[in-house]
Image: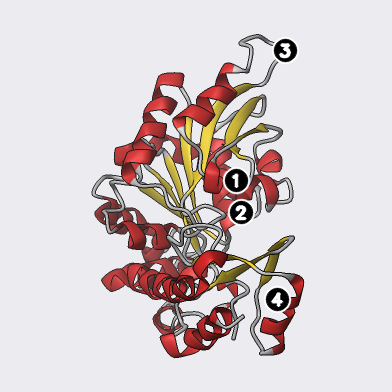
């Protein structure tokens, strides 16, 4: 009955087991064996040498990445509806020590080379204007839309041409990859991404996200920023254990596929109520206040997105039998 947020989903049993196995004496902070193994494990996944850092939240991953890519006097181009713009309580500006978020347009909260260029070309190249230093895209977006490798590559080429760093907010990166069926490398570094916030908490983890640097020279200063921000946890092995458990046997993909499958069931029942194509695990529907109240009266929990719109989010742990009652209720409104 719970479709409010995948953050509310339980922790996967494999992650809980990994935490138990990590509950032994080891070196503190990130000097333990599990933390030290992250670079190699994520390098194997992405088919290139990366630096992988654990952090305790998606906000931390996003903001540390942006601080590495943009100086305090610079700007970060993002979509007007990006999470870093609307849902981080000013954290990007705080962690970058003042960098400006520069807002661009795009259908489904997706940027395109055209919309980015329109914004960039409007900024005079002089000392009186904040100059862009980075781009940030979200995959999957706030509306559950997914960037394909070719779309990321087009943005990546533009970023390279303009001398901008490219960050990907991947709070639901697993759901995007599950939808695309591609290699994680194809939609990240091969397409020009410099840093990735790789989300695990929404997808079965408990309290650990991964910050992946494909441009590895960005990592050294980030280690200092992570400590200075109070994000270097003294028992980091428990965060590393979660990430490694999700990587084992591609559990991160298995759980994402389950959540995506649930969203597809709801989309199939929505008909003309559907506001956006369903490409991950979020479903946006037209529903009047009365219709929303009728769904809630049946016990379903969800988010009122905008006037006459609701958002439904499916989770890795919801089986079809948990989802079909809501699909039937939507179909019969």
Q: Alpha carbon of mark 2 to alpha carbon of mark 4: how far?
A: 30 Å
Point out which mark residue 63 bears.
Answer: 1
Nearer-N-terminus badge (1/4): 1
Q: Alpha carbon of mark 4 to alpha carbon of mark 3: how far?
A: 49 Å
Q: Position of residue 197 (x, y in %)?
A: 48, 51
The residue closer to the viewer here, 64 or 270, is: 270
The residue closer to the viewer here, 94 or 88, is: 88
Nearer-N-terminus badge (4/3): 3
Tag in front: 3 or 2: 3
Label 1 Cα crowd, 10 Å radius (few <14 / some 14-19 / many 20+): many
Q: Is residue 71 left or right of residue 288?
A: left
Point out which mark residue 25 bears.
Answer: none
Q: Alpha carbon of mark 3 to alpha carbon of mark 2: how far?
A: 30 Å
Point out which mark residue 292 bears.
Answer: 4
Query: Which residue: 37% across, 40% down?
Result: 151
Nearer-N-terminus badge (3/2): 2
Number of numbered markers: 4
Query: Which residue: 45% across, 41% down?
Result: 219
Q: Position of residue 156 (x, y in %)?
A: 39, 32
- SS type, badge 3: loop
| Pointers 3 and 2 in contact (C-beta within 8 Å) | no
Tag in front: 3 or 1: 3
Tag in front: 4 or 3: 4
Q: Which residue does the numbered mark 3 point to in the structure image? A: 128
- SS type, badge 2: helix
Label 3 Cα crowd, 10 Å radius (few <14 / some 14-19 / many 20+): few
| Pointers 1 and 2 in contact (C-beta within 8 Å) | yes
- SS type, badge 4: helix
Q: Alpha carbon of mark 1 to alpha carbon of mark 2: how far?
A: 6 Å
Q: Position of residue 126 (x, y in %)?
A: 65, 9
């Amino acid at each position: 009955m719970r479709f409010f947020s995948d953050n509310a989903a339980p922790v996967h049993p494999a992650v809980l087991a990994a935490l138990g196995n990590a509950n032994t004496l080891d070196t503190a902070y990130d000097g333990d064996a599990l933390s030290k193994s992250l670079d190699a494990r994520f390098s194997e996944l992405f088919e290139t040498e990366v630096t992988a850092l654990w952090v305790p939240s998606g906000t931390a991953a996003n903001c540390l990445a942006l601080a590495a890519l943009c100086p305090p006097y610079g700007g970060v181009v993002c979509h007007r509806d990006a999470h870093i713009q609307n849902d981080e309580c000013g954290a990007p500006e705080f962690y970058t020590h003042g960098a400006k978020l520069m807002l661009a347009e795009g259908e489904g909260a997706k940027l395109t080379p055209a919309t980015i260029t329109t914004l960039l070309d409007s900024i005079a190249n002089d000392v009186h204007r904040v100059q862009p230093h980075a781009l940030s895209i979200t995959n999957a977006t706030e509306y559950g839309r997914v960037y394909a490798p070719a779309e990321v590559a087009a943005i990546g080429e533009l970023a390279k041409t303009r001398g901008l760093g490219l960050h990907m907010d991947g709070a639901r990166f697993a759901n995007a990859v599950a939808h695309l069926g591609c290699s994680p490398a194809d939609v990240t570094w091969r397409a020009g991404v410099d840093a990735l916030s790789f989300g695990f908490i929404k997808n079965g983890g408990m309290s650990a996200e991964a910050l992946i640097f494909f441009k590895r020279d960005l990592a050294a200063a980030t280690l200092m920023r992570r400590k200075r921000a109070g994000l270097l946890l003294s028992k980091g092995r428990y965060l590393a254990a979660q990430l490694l458990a999700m990587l084992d046997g591609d559990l991160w993909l298995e759980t994402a596929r389950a959540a995506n499958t649930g969203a597809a069931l709801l989309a199939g029942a929505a008909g003309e109520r559907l506001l956006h194509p369903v490409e991950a695990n979020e479903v946006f529907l037209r529903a009047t206040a009365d219709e929303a109240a009728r769904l809630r009266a049946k016990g379903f929990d969800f988010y009122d997105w905008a006037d006459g719109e609701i958002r439904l989010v499916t989770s890795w742990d919801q089986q079809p039998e948990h989802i079909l009652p809501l699909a039937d209720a939507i179909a019969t409104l």
